[in-house]
Image (cartoon, grey):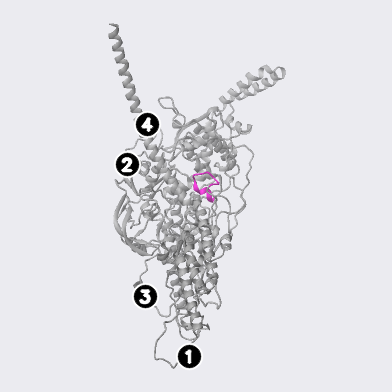
Amino acid sequence: MKQRTQSNSPQPLPHRSLRFRCCYFFELCSAVSSSFKVPLLLFLRALRFCEEMALFNDRSIDDHQILSISYEGAAPATQVDLWVHDPAIGALALDWDLSPDSHHLSRWYTESSRELFDHGKSTFISNGALLLRSSLHKKYNDSERFLLLGDRITNGDAKWGNTTPQFGEISFIDGYWEWLEDVLARNKDMLTSAKIYDAVFASLFTYVRNKNLIRSFCELWCPSTNSLHVPIGEVSISLWDLRLTGGLSIDGVFYDEAVPSARELTGVDKKNVPLLPSSCKYLFLAYRRIYCASETSNVTIHDWVKFWFKEEPRYKQPPARVQKKRLSEPRTSNNPTGFIGEKKPRSKDTEKVFDDLGVEKDVKEETNLAALLSCWLCVFVLPNKEVDQIRPGVFKVASMTAQGKRFSLAVPVLASIYHGLREITSSPNPSKCGAAFPIHYVYGWLGRYYDSYFLSDPTRLNCGARMVRLAGEKKAKHFSLQEACDLLKSITPSTLSLLALGKPQQGIVTDHGKHSDSWNDYIISLRSSYLILRRGNEHIVEPYNPHRFGRQFRFCQDIPGKLREEHSTGTLEAIYQLWESCTRLNTRAEFMIPSHSSEGLAAKEYVEWWEKSSSNFCKDKLACEKPNSPSAAPKRKNVITIPIVKSKLVTEVTPPLSKSKEKEVSKAVAKESEKVAAVKPRTPLSIPASKPKPIVLKASKPTGENKKRTAVVLSEESSSDKGDCHWKRLKKKAIDSYSRLKEKVTVFDLAKLDFNLDGVLDDLLDTSNHLELGNQFASDEREGSVNGPDPFDLALRSKHNFASGAIHLPSTSKPSISKPLMLGRAAPSTVTAFDTGSMINCGRLLAAKIYDSNVKSILGKTPFEKLTSLRPKLQVIYAEFSKLELDYSPLQTQVEKYIQNTTNYVSMRSNFASGMTSEAKERQLADVDTKRGQLMEELEQLDLKAKKLRESLEGIDAQRAQKQHVVSTLQAE
């Protein structure tokens, strides 16, 4: 609340005329002699300070406590009144009795033998399952179908407006970037001590979005579970995600956004130490000045920045957004470079701001830092529906942070995100719901898990907040509404644990409160709890359910159950107890941390439960993956089926249909195509058509948002062997092994792929040459795969193809199978002569074909690294060719080209492997963090031992001195 008392007749005080007379006397004396100037100047400054002495008073209006801010002798109209709320932290905070065991378990994991669904192989496997437990949920296996915003829009119960609102997205603030660069250069050590340097640095840029992606994200978000519903299950934004993407600390002091009373603002404790930092009162005085000078009843962000920072602006507002497709990261940017130079001296105008407020010299830096942090908290960290205004309730937190106090920011930020998404997804008109929350952290989450942004080089900015990689205008990729929805649904289990910590081997971690900051935050993020946000008299409570998306922490996924108790708000004491339970450390609870190589799988019960409970909108056009079961597929007539075969593309075709059944076939084709994509989602291969042209069966034209595929391209071979014609084209002849080499399949640009081929060559016989290629998707930590051809055919491509960055693979069309020779009654002989030369030539050619086939087969099964060792054995084969008087030069040329190209490929792979991928960096950083925590613990133990040894040595020295004294006394006697 802000209240300004109106008065039409301000009464001037008598000492104002005294000041006027002194000024006149000062001018007169300085004209005569300069010796009067210094003492009179000091006298006038003291008189001005006496005249403008700040007054902070507590008073009540209708049983509500009010903080009044004014100056002695100032007009009553310049008085500013603010609502005061009870403090939750500080010397005047109430002393609550905290429950020691609320919402806590002694073990947060369970191990059991389960049937787990392997999405990569689309089969169930029996294995030990490591499951994450929850203290807030009870077992509940009923399959109540979830209702999403997308379902409500489909049913007509909700509707987007013509425009998608900002939802709290930050906008350009003139002067903020320059001010922030100055503050970062001056206060790096203090911000690092408060564990927010990276989080503050992240606000140095703009963050943009693709509106269709945000709309699709909201349509798939479930407010009852606080998670995103996709075909494979639930995924969500975790506390640990905010820790890594936004640099926000999880552990720390309770975020208490409330205006303090005058007693707390100006009081001191028994040791004469101020209850609050002195910078806090200067923030309120600055707020009062800007408020009184403003024509509106608020203080805007622009006015706040303009008041504190008087330097010349260097950055201009980025241009308006243009929604269009881009193939690469934009070359130019109006954002800062991120380089923080040395601190520079302030201008006289900036120094005058501190002088006018009466800020002491030793707290100028602290006050300047607190002023910027106030702006940062209101705009970037926790914006509300009045996104362009300064909230005086943040001054207390900002001033304490400016002294190095560490606050738990990830908890209220995630509560704000969950609450904002709940408002959007529950509204009949999401565009007009007025929700505002730090949505740029959602952008950062999408950029890490999905290929939705052009990511900058991770080495360009030395910042722990990984969202800076997608910062800058024009960095968001363009998607249509259907493309955005498909992208969100396409996430695979292998990509869920990109940000999870792990250990080289699975092991137990006990919460004793002495781990490193990273591990303490990780422990908190693994526990189910309630997230709290306190803004004045607004108390927000949101459930945090990490066991619903345990695969993001490498745990296996089980049925999550039902929340025992719903909380949406509560008293200050109640929400503080919930927050304390959420962030409590030293609980002695045990956590099983999976290894780096672990991949969270879904239990069979969860797959069946999700199939029944997931929303229709969630499963639309991309069905949930199920294991292949021949008995589960019902037999349909006149339907085109596309079975999955390793490294083959086989299509079974039924005879032509009548026009009356054309629509039915088209629908069946679409459904079967979706089933194939759901059973085994792979990176698609682009197969160019070769003459004769393939048959294209067009489906009925889709309408609205259900547009998908409109055509199915059939293979060039018929499933029937009868007749010379197949429908309306000539039957294609069998393709021999040499003609297959002429067909090409373009995969992807090699420069855009991260190679990850370790261990693949050992499985060539079992996987039909299945190549694993790292696909740069969301970040360069996603994994994809393509079905490759015979490795010999792959390497036969010229060296030019590797250098140009493209891999060409032969067609995977099914080769024709020759029928065995049928023996019957002997026909009359037509041989008139016994041609021994022809027979010998045929024998030679047959032997040559056998040698050729066997050589290629052996080479194809040999690991690339060992091919060069086969050259001596190949010389023996060539010698046999010479004995048969055959020209083996074509085979030798192909083999040598194959060996040379595979050698180049191995060299390229080793070069790519030498550049560590982001996922490997993450794991290495996690290992380093783990080792650092262990070393810190060992160091603390060594410090304790050293302390005990010092105390023991001091005791021995004292005993030695005492005994020496006794000896000297005896000697003297």
| Distance in Å between CA atoms under marks 3 and 4 | 71 Å
Query: Which stretch is magenta?
Result: 459-470
Is residue 178 among what the camera can see?
yes
Mark positioned earlier in the residue sequence (3 or 4):
3
How far is the residue under mark 3 from the one under mark 1? Answer: 56 Å
Q: Which badge, 3 or 2, is on the more N-terminal residue?
A: 2
**SS at badge 3:** loop
What type is the residue that disc 3 sits on?
Pro
Q: Is residue 788 visible?
A: no
First in sequence, mark 4 or 1: give its number: 1
Q: Which residue is mark 3?
A: 634
Whether 8 is drawn above or below 218: the answer is: above
Residue labelled with disc 4: 943
Q: Amino acid at mark 4?
A: Asp
> Label 1 to label 2, Cα distance in Å?
96 Å
Q: Choose top left, top right, bottom left or bottom right for residue 962.
A: top left
Left or right side of 172 for 100: left
Residue tagged 2: 587
Given the image, on which type of amino acid does mark 2 rest? Thr
Q: Tell me the residue that label 1 is attached to.
A: 831
Q: Nearer the viewer, mark 3 or mark 1?
A: 1
Circle 4 SS class: helix
